[in-house]
Amino acid sequence: MALKPNGGMCLIREQIIEDPVSGLTIQFAHVPGSDAPFRLRIHGDLPYGDRELLFNSAGEEAGAGTALGGHCRPSWLREIRD
């Protein structure tokens, strides 16, 4: 893992972003009470399956691997119209 020298914190809300060009869906999630409470999930037609990146409370990478469960379209998801 490489940390940017003097890197600042990046605040990102929980959300799901669908990118129609790449066909990927990116999900930012918070899992309170976990050793790695911040998660970035990438869903789509990936060669080794969906991916999950875990971050600790300091914002540092805590692990990565194949996302084994969970849906990327939870019940609260709704389209935002301008």
Image (tube, rainbow, N blue to C red):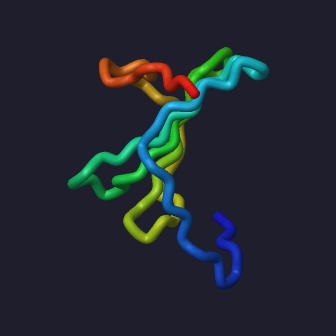
**Quadrant including the N terminus:** bottom right
Residue 70, can we see it?
A: no
Residue 51 falls left or right of residue 21: left
Q: Nearer the viewer, residue 22 or 62?
A: 22
42 relative to 6, above or below: above
Give percent across and percent down for residue 58: 43, 71
Q: How many marks?
A: 0
Give percent across and percent down for residue 55: 46, 56
8 relative to 20, above or below: below
Q: Quadrant of residue 51?
A: top right
**In the current view of this chain or complex, which residue is farthest to the left?**
33
**In the current view of this chain or complex, which residue is farthest to the right?**
21
Q: Quadrant of residue 17?
A: top right
Residue beneath the point at 34% across and 53% down: 37
Residue 34 falls left or right of residue 24: left
Residue 13 falls left or right of residue 20: left
Give percent across and percent down for residue 24: 66, 23
**In the current view of this chain or complex, which residue is farthest to the bottom?**
6
Residue beneath the point at 53% across and 38% down: 65
Residue 56, can we see it?
A: yes
Residue 11 falls left or right of residue 7: left
Residue beneath the point at 53% across and 59% down: 61
**Quadrant including the C terminus:** top right
Q: Quadrant of residue 6?
A: bottom right
Give percent across and percent down for residue 16: 50, 31
Q: Nearer the viewer, residue 10 or 38?
A: 10
48 relative to 63, above or below: above
